[in-house]
Image (spheres, rainbow, N blue to C red):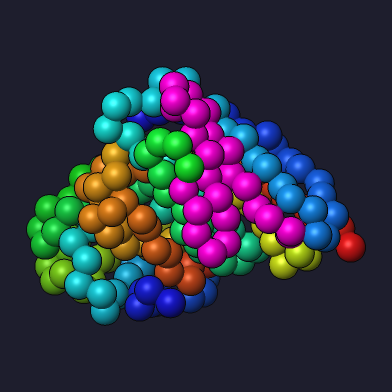
Amino acid sequence: LAKTTQPISMDSYEGQEVNITCSHNNIATNDYITWYQQFPSQGPRFIIQGYKTKVTNEVASLFIPADRKSSTLSLPRVSLSDTAVYYCLVGEGLGRRALTFGSGTRLQVQP
Amino acid sequence: DAGITQSPRHKVTETGTPVTLRCHQTENHRYMYWYRQDPGHGLRLIHYSYGVKDTDKGEVSDGYSVSRSKTEDFLLTLESATSSQTSVYFCAIGTRGGEQYFGPGTRLTVT
């Protein structure tokens, strides 16, 4: 399974754009990149998934360069409620393949 | 919500006793997973299932067993609970697109 590296923590202020970068140097051809969000005492929540270039949904954008060795989760105009731990995972897109969660990035949004 | 429930939500048990945690889904997904999460750590995969009676071990499977006799239910059993198995346990279902949806978690304390 591809190992991922992401910052342990980040701080931001309300209304700012936050970019969290994840490194995955040994990503395989069939691997997708998926991001999850977790609040205290809750299970992780799926945010976004992509394979290459850019993916955007109603909550975030995911940027993936051509070499796919890294990816960046972009959260536009964060609010206090975006304070959470964000996990980057790499694995096959099909549900059969088990994913490995790293330690994640703890995002703290200040007023 | 993805239609996943876990029971019990909280349990305190003594060392050496067997414990079974239940995960129930209403989404008819083939893929189901059991994770544990310890303070300050990401999720670690215990066991997973590709379908009825089709299961496999994750990275921390020692001391745990699972059963999947129906699509909707995935049971996790601690044959003889130990204090090191005190943790929060999350069940998840996986879609064919690779997204996982998590249950609310079970907080297990082994005294």
Q: Position of residue B24 (x, y in %)?
A: 29, 75
Which residue sits at x=10%, y=58%?
B53
Which range of residues does the magenta coloring cover? A55-78
Q: Position of residue B35 (x, y in %)?
A: 41, 53
Question: Taking B29 as reference, is B82 above or below it?
Answer: above
In which image quadrant can residue A83 be found?
bottom right
In which image quadrant can residue B25 be found?
bottom left
Q: Nearer the viewer, residue A8 or B87?
A: A8
Q: Residue extending furthest right?
A: A111
Q: Position of residue A55 (x, y in %)?
A: 46, 48
Which residue sits at x=58%, y=38%?
A72
Which residue sits at x=25%, y=74%?
B27
Asked if residue B93 lies left or right of residue B107, the reply is left
Q: Nearer the viewer, residue B13 or B5?
A: B5
Asked if residue B107 lies left or right of residue A51, the reply is right
Q: Nearer the viewer, residue B8 or A95?
A: A95
Asked if residue A13 lies left or right of residue A66, the reply is right
Q: Position of residue B60 (x, y in %)?
A: 38, 41
The quarter of the rendered structure image containing the C terminus of chain B is bottom right
Which residue sits at x=11%, y=62%?
B52
Could you tell me if residue B103 is visible in this image?
A: yes
The quarter of the rendered structure image containing the N terminus of chain B is bottom left
Question: Taking B71 as reference, is A97 above or below it?
Answer: above
| Total labels drawn | 0
Question: Taking B26 as reference, is B48 above or below it?
Answer: above
**Magenta residue check for A69:** yes
Could you tell me if residue A103 is visible in this image?
A: no
**Magenta residue check for B11:** no
